[in-house]
Image (tube, rainbow, N blue to C red):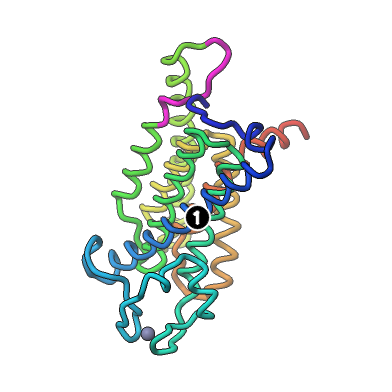
Amino acid sequence: MTGTLFPPEFLFADRFFCAYVVALAFILGSVLGSFLNCMAWRAVHGGSVRKGRSRCTHCGHILSAAELVPVFSYLLLRGRCRHCGERVSPRYMLTELSLGLFFAAAVLRFGVSAEALRAAGLACILLSLSLIDLDSYRIPNHFIAAALLWWTVFLFFAPAGRGLSFWHRAGAALFEGVAGGAAVGGGMLLISLLFDRLTGKESLGGGDIKLFFAAGLYLGPAAGLLCVILSCVFGLVFALLRRQQRIPFGPAISSALLLCLLFGRQVVIWYMNLL
Ligand SMILES: [Zn+2]
């Protein structure tokens, strides 16, 4: 991908520099994770998204700056509110931690580059929609629209090489993405329609299908198929853990998509070599 400031090889050459960049990426990811948590909570439970200080949801105590440090505040306070002692859901800490780890992994995988930025931005969108899906069983359309827009922006940073012109590269990336979106989104739509007809129940929500379409856009057809398989595995694990009738599928698709974005291409190449 063009638009690379430091490729991974450059980062790995100096251990200290590498640790520094990865730590920065982790901090940025966990801070953004904390912010998105708060936005998602307010989007579902009401309250202005931009205004208002963060509070304990139990006693209303306004959290001080020291209580708002991502991941560490939770660990230091042993997962309880300092004021009323009520348990704070580990969900906040876990989302901060996972977005921080994902940012760090993206930098290790793609270096300091447009591709890492693409992955990090997508992770923010997917984290937000997953948190909302967990609480409200719906994936708002504007998150899907944001993912599509973000994908379009990065068409202009499509992989360099083979002496192709800029428009050739953007065109090839556009074609691969649209083929992936049609294959994955269209395939899942057909499967879910068939399933609904057979069982008489709704299997996948419309938001899930749209999210699969977005996954295909980002991954292309081959890694997109891997993403479908992984989503089903994650969804199944999630269903076993949550033990509820209705399972939000958004978090499973999102985590599969992000894993495939990091490692999908290598897994596909490895699998092709087996054949
Ligand atoms: Zn409290």
Q: Mark 1 points at which residue?
A: 27
Would residue 64 appear left or right of 95 to someone viewing this image? left
Q: Residue at x 42, y 42 (%)?
A: 214
User: Extreme right residue here?
Assistant: 274
Q: Is residue 204 magenta?
A: no
Q: Quadrant of residue 130?
A: bottom left
- Residue in the foreground of this view, choosing between 40 and 25: 25
Q: Where is residue 84 in the image (x, y as percent from the top left)?
A: 39, 89
Q: Magenta region: which residues? A: 154-163
Q: Main secondary structure of the magenta part?
A: loop
Q: How crowded is mark 1: few (under 14 residues within 10 Å), some or many (20 or more)?
A: many
Q: In this view, does 36 lie above or below 61?
A: above
User: Extreme bottom residue here?
Assistant: 84
State ligand 1's quadrant. Answer: bottom left
- Residue in the foreground of this view, choosing between 237 and 18: 18
Element at label 1: helix
Q: Residue at x 28, y 64 (%)?
A: 43
- Residue in the foreground of this view, choosing between 54 and 14: 14
- Residue in the foreground of this view, choosing between 20 and 55: 20
Q: Position of residue 15 (x, y in %)?
A: 68, 43
Q: Is residue 238 above or below residue 62?
A: above
Q: Is residue 103 above or below residue 135?
A: above
Q: Where is residue 273 in the image (x, y as percent from the top left)?
A: 76, 31
Would residue 131 appear left or right of 12 to someone viewing this image? left
Q: Which residue is drawn at 59% across and 35% down?
A: 222
Q: Position of residue 83 (x, y in %)?
A: 39, 87
Q: What residue type is labelled 1?
A: Ile
